[in-house]
């Protein structure tokens, strides 16, 4: 495989390579990385850019002067490395103030503070040139429903998103907003748990055209759902504004594994969808090195995400060229132009379709050849074709 290039548009969250290996049972296993250092390391490896939360760059509670100094240094590092900031977001989960939600807190003071923090983070994102703004509602959820806020919470969430979209437009930021669903963790139940839920919610917003999805491979997998299917639905709706690539075992804690580490076939079909759909946003890795690793493991993780993507992209090309796979695909899809034409509604077509005599015994007994097609796919992925 070739090495990653800027034109591949691979991006990483500052928090991903910067992950220090903390988990609910144990302290950090690695030192924090300076964001400028991460930029240099990622640029050397062919990445296109980074994404960030406000507090990945500017520590919580920094003075205005300190903020400007940090942002100035970071902007110089962006210019030196040629990396872009492609996506920005708000940390609305670390500070204990958000323990029972940010935009959906039952406390109006917390909701107002969440708006303030997000507007400031949007100012930062716009200053750094980000075009997509992500909302991952990690703390927007509940462990108990006794508070009785289920319907209120959705209304508060909607009010906040409407407010922030209006703020972005009033400032001329031009952000496209991407909602990132997750079923659980850190909350017992997170609101808008899946891609389908978020797509439904967007239609209730004041400016639905400004909102799309940032689906994450691991999050749909945690819900026991298929990531390629979720991705396809976001694409079909014209709502794939961004994507979080990683991996995950089903029914586990949030693992954020290296892309392709676990579900290779689903990763293959993910790459196929991204490459063939005309999606041209960043291929964003939201994962981190295993807690066992030192800094060398961090860069092995980052290189691995990009290399696996590129290898799978080569496999997608081979899949399309392989004569046996081509033949199997052609046999799978049965065309019938007369019947397909009848599927376009007119009163005459409806009558004709009602009168049609189908050879049901033949349709029932036909084998579509999916066993062989899937085996051919496995052989291709194993390098045997
Ligand atoms: C957090 C979460 C991710 C989200 C990020 C955006 S931060 O690490 O696990 O899935 O994409 O806030
Ligand atoms: Mn994510
Ligand atoms: Mn995750
Ligand atoms: Mn995550």
Image (tube, rainbow, N blue to C red):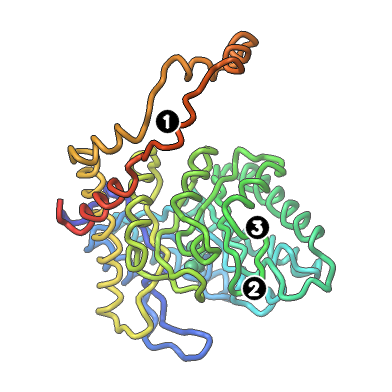
Q: Residue at x 51, y 53 (%)?
A: 214
Q: Position of residue 301 (x, y in %)?
A: 29, 71
Q: Position of residue 228 (x, y in %)?
A: 44, 51
Q: Which residue is mark 3?
A: 192
Q: Are marks 3 and 1 in contact (CB under 8 Å)?
A: no
Element under disc 2: loop
Location of residue 58 with respect to 376 vertically, above or below? below
Q: Position of residue 42 (x, y in %)?
A: 28, 64
Q: Which residue is mark 1?
A: 362
Tell which of 260 and 310 is nearer to you.
260
Q: Which residue is mark 2?
A: 187
Tell which of 121 and 374 is nearer to you.
374
Q: Which mark is nearer the camera, 3 or 1? A: 1
Q: Residue at x 31, y 83 (%)?
A: 293
Tell me the crowding category of disc 2: few under 14, some 14 to 19, or many 20 or more residues within 10 angstroms, Cα based.
Answer: many
Q: Earlier in the sequence, mark 3 or mark 1?
A: 3
Element under disc 3: loop
Tell me the crowding category of disc 3: few under 14, some 14 to 19, or many 20 or more residues within 10 angstroms, Cα based.
Answer: many
Q: Quadrant of the N terminus?
A: bottom left
Q: Which mark is nearer the camera, 1 or 2? A: 1
Element under disc 1: helix
Tell me the crowding category of disc 1: few under 14, some 14 to 19, or many 20 or more residues within 10 angstroms, Cα based.
Answer: few
């Amino acid at each position: 495989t070739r090495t990653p290039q800027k034109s591949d548009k691979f991006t990483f969250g500052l928090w991903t390579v910067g992950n220090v290996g903390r988990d609910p049972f144990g302290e950090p296993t690695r030192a924090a990385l300076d964001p400028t250092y991460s930029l240099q390391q990622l640029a050397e490896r062919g990445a296109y850019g980074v994404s960030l939360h406000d507090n990945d760059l500017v520590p919580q509670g920094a003075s205005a002067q300190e903020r400007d100094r940090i942002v100035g240094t970071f902007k110089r590092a962006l210019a030196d490395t040629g990396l872009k900031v492609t996506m920005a977001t708000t940390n609305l989960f670390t500070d204990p103030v958000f323990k029972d939600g940010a935009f959906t807190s039952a406390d109006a003071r917390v909701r107002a503070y969440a708006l303030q923090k997000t507007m400031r983070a949007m100012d930062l994102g716009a200053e750094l040139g980000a075009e997509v703004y992500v909302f991952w509602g990690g703390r927007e959820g509940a462990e108990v429903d006794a508070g009785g806020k289920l319907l209120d919470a959705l209304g508060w969430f909607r009010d906040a998103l409407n407010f922030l979209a209006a703020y972005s437009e009033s400032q001329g930021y031009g952000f496209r907003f991407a909602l990132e669903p997750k079923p659980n963790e850190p909350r017992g139940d997170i609101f808008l748990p899946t891609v389908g839920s978020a797509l439904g919610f967007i239609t209730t917003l004041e400016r639905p055209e400004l909102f799309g999805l940032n689906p994450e491979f691991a999050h749909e997998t945690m819900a026991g759902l298929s990531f390629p299917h979720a991705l396809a639905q976001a694409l079909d709706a014209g709502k794939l504004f961004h994507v979080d690539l990683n991996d995950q075992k089903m029914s586990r804690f949030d693992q954020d594994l290296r892309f392709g580490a676990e579900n290779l076939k689903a990763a293959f079909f993910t790459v196929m969808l991204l490459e063939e759909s005309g999606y041209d946003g960043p291929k964003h890795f939201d994962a981190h090195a295993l807690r066992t690793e030192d800094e060398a493991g961090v860069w092995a993780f980052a290189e691995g995400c990009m290399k696996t993507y590129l290898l799978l992209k080569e496999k997608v090309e081979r899949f399309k060229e392989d004569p046996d796979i081509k033949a199997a695909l052609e046999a799978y899809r049965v065309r019938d132009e007369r019947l397909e034409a009848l599927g376009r509604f007119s009163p005459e077509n409806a009558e004709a379709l009602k009168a049609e005599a189908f050879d049901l015994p033949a349709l029932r007994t036909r084998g579509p050849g999916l066993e062989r097609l899937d085996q051919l796919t496995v052989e291709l992925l194993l390098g045997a074709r």
